[in-house]
Amino acid sequence: MICSPTGTGKTLTAFLPIFSELAERRDRDELYARTFALYVSPLRALGYDVEHNVRRPLREMGLLERPNAERARVRRGRLREKFVRTGVRTGDTPTAERRLMLSRPPHILMTTPESLALMLAMESYRATLRDLRFVVVDEVHALAGNKRGAHLSLLLESIEELARTSVQRIGLSATVAPLEPVTRYLAGTDRPCTVVDARAIRETRLDIRAPFTGAMAPLATLARSAASAIDRARTTLVFTNVRSQTERIAYELHRLAGNGAAIETLDADAAPRLSDARIGVHHSALERSVRHRTEARLRAGDLRAVVCSASLELGVDIGAIEQVLVVGGARGVVATLQRIGRAGHRPGEIARGVILAQDRDDIIEAAATRRCIADAVIEEIAVPHTPLDVLAQWIVSCVVPERRVDIESLLRIARRAAPFATLARDDLLACAAYLGGGGIADDPAHVRRIGFDGGAVWGLGRAESAAYFENVGTIPDERSVPVRIAGERSFGRLDENFVDRLRVGDIFVLEGRTVRVERIDRSGITTRAHRGRPTVPRWNSNIRGIEPPLADEIDRLRAGVADRLAAGERGDASAWLGRRYALTSELCERIVAYVEQQLAVSTIPRDRRPVVEIYSLDGLQSAVVLTGIGRRANEALARVAATRISRIVSGSVRLLTDDTGLMLQLPPRSRLRDVQWERLFDEPNFENDLREGLLASTLLRTHFRYVANTGLLVLRRANGRSLRASSLRWNSGRILDRLVREDDRFPLVREAFRSVCEDVLDAKRARKFCVSLLAPPRIIHPPVASPMSFGILTSSFGDDVAVADRSEMVDALHERVLAYLAESVAP
Amino acid sequence: MSAGPRANSVALGGGATALAGGMLWIETTASLVVADLHLGYEEAIGGALPLWSLDDSLKGIETALASYCARELILLGDVVHSVRLSEGAGDRVDGAMQRLRRVCTLTVVAGNHEGATRGRALLGECVEAVERAGMLLHHGDRPRIDGLRHVIGHLHPSVALGGERSVPAFLSARELIVVPASTPYSRGLNILTRDCRDAIGAYGAHPSSTQVVAATDTHCYPFGTIGELARAARALRFPESNR
């Protein structure tokens, strides 16, 4: 396990023993037409990048295959070869190339977990992998903590079963913590692992700028500040937290360019297109070709700056970046290190980054992030605990199309993978049972994925195995909708969830173009170029939440200032900030003023007592609960509280969470007394109330859909066709309702709850928070919005906890419509 | 009929009555009409799932047949989601048809999901249309105007409640009755969309004169006309996701 910051030569390090082995094999005349080394990375593009990078040293060592002459002789029947072949096998690899790979397997093969899963299920590829000696797993930090990584851990064990000799695993990871579970993830449960810990070898420098004087900076002001920074460097990456912000910043930069500022001007008659200037836009909603073009231009030095979301945080070599700007903050220590690690991407160079704070919370977050980096305290990776949907898919992969494996062997192999170390036999049997066509309340399915007789599982042949080959992988199928200008090709894509909220006439920005929605239909969104300001600014779904230890450090900072202010030591508060967080006196002063304002109308949550601020918004009683436990835990807490409220009032409780706390809004004509608010966070029945709150939620339904797809219960693609996402979403909800009714111990129902509670929410931390409360929350009725609540009060609502069943909702709607119609016809 | 209080059933004129559960009752011939069952849906989408909706639908239909003393059951097209079912699922559908035939006269109208064979192989005898009480009952995938009042399925009309929730609804005009889908696996066609207006327009029906009756398992809810509901939706701003 090699753990060191970005840009320190990890990849080459990993390949050295592989080069050595291959050179020795060649010298011994043992370079057979087999794959000896696999390189697995979470990003397809990385495979191509790394192939390109390893070919150079191979060429310099005289190991790389020369074209044609040798190839022809090998084809004539020679078993041994003189030169090393490399190849990439991903979903993008053309069929002809895949076919060639079977007849002449690359000695070093770059792939992704999904393509590896496919290869391990195909006899033709399995034959080429039997002499495997090395598996390099890149970006372990991006895999160990999720289901994709759990899937890979099982595949690595499948490789171990397949290979003639033991395979050496080499893991590459950027800064990661804690090392022990991550190394165990890489090595499996019963193998030793050598760790090369070089986490501290790269120097980073993080500056904080706050280009505003009041409470916050408008995006245009941030863009002006970014523009002047861009102007001073050769190349700049501007990171934002959400795609909408990426587009808005790019839009503002473009406007500045149009005004003759630092950015290149554009043809005034053309629809705004940043890609025409030397500033690019990069985020995951853009077409792959647009993203690749931007990456290539950045690498070639054609672009002065690229505004991006997390899409450029990981992965491909993007050339020499001089500086990184992080707009608003990266919402995490690891994310900050990844982002600023993109600058000075060469050994010995200092990684320089600047956080452009958008409001005073950002200044605090940036200061706390810098403290965490200095203390080498980073977010910890939690390896998923026995994801049963992944297990189910792996079981199928072990037997398709016509192999047979006994249950005891499956159990033994799976338990070697760290995420499945404690796999229960009953869980394995339950998965095999539903895949085998039964197991739901004695009502068998007529569709079976595998055969199962209680003691063994087996493949049912090619036709029945198609479901596996068409649906392999664990990446959630988040569908997107193409966006085009009338009469042109599509230029980008939007999340289906976002499109659900769009209406004809809305104006939004995508790839730097301002467009107006003309039509929304099944083929996509047709738009027209527009000159006005955008009316639909946000995609909220991808906001990353702040986790401990950063959340704790932010809490410490606020409490530290509040304590000093309470003791009447204002000067000391400022000095303490300067000492602990290395802030300028001006920034210290702004933080102190912020905390003072908070104390003037409310208070700061501390001493394990949250603060509940009660407001009336549009006549609806709303409470902001300030907790300081991070967004994921806040969301779990919010759902528990909303469930409890719903037992007191009738109607749906709306909820919203952010890093500071959570907000609950009561239905019309409902109110809670202070004493009722106080009791919402009691610990008893926490788990039951969370489960109840999740049952009707969109969150659980969405994740059940992912789980049902991964577990091959409901397919994303069948008979060569993809199911419409809206149908899939709707049907999965119906199926979940039915499954919960029939058998709430069904493995995928349990997995849906597990993955929501553990992977999406932080139910454990939320519960711990409830247990640790020393006294009931402080209830405050602020006369105006407190500074800490301002952000959440001005956000739009996310999910609701719909306690009303459909009948109650129809009743309520019917009542409202009748009242409206009666009123509207009254004289 | 206009907007009014909820009830177990709502008369739609011409002897037709909307029933809770989304079924239509034709008094003069004692016929119960059920549209768009889409049996075998779970399997047709490639799901390794039991055929839950078949059992549920059968139970609901048998209860309604008994309580209304129906002489005839008319299945108004799209009885199955796909005619390409596994042997086991095909047997289950066949068994269900036989069970229904034992308690009443079963008339199966073919729908677009019955494929090119119009369901004959799987469902037995199927017809394209039948006339009852002066109304022409057909699936509705082939719109036509011929002076009769049409009773169709196919459109899956529904009232959106917000988020991912909706409730099936009857649409009733002088020219047309649309029976909601009985399958639980359809979100339905939002009656306030242009697609719905266009579809009923093909039969000469207009939103301002087409009544909406939402139907849950236990009640019918007369919402007034599509036009009135659209006005209320704009004024009351529901549902949030409506466009």
Image (tube, rainbow, N blue to C red):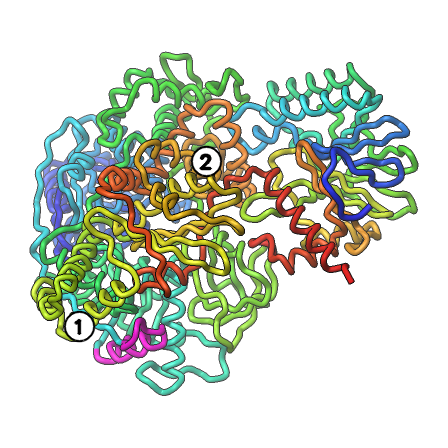
| x, y percent for residue A137 | 22, 42
Q: How many numbered marks, from 0 up?
A: 2
- Residue at x 53% of width, y 51% of height: A668
Q: Quadrant of residue A340?
A: bottom left
Name the spot of residue A430 as percent of width and height, x first: 39, 20
Q: Are marks 2 and 1 on the same chain?
A: yes
Circle nearer the viewer, 2 or 1: 1
Q: Is A64 left or right of A272, judged from the image as shown? A: left
Q: Amino acid at mark 1?
A: Glu
Compared with residue A366, is residue A743 higher up or lower down, i.e. above or below?
Answer: above
Amino acid type, mark 2: Leu
Q: Chain of mark 1?
A: A
Residue A38: tell me if it is visible.
no
Comparing B210 with A193, the one in front is B210
The location of residue A199, given as percent across then percent down, is 10, 51
Q: Left or right of A626: which side holds A380? A: left
User: Percent from the top left, x then y, of residue B29?
Assistant: 89, 27
Tell which residue pokes out farthest to the bottom in this image.
A260
Does any portion of residue A394 appear in the rendered image? yes
Q: Determine which residue is flagged by label 2.
A: A695
Q: Residue at x 40, y 36 (%)?
A: A472
The magenta-colored residue range is A212-232
Residue A589's disc is: 1
Where is the N terminus of chain B found, in terms of image quarters?
top right
Element class at badge 2: helix
User: Which chain is disc 2 placed on?
Assistant: A
The one nearer the camera, B63 or A346, is B63
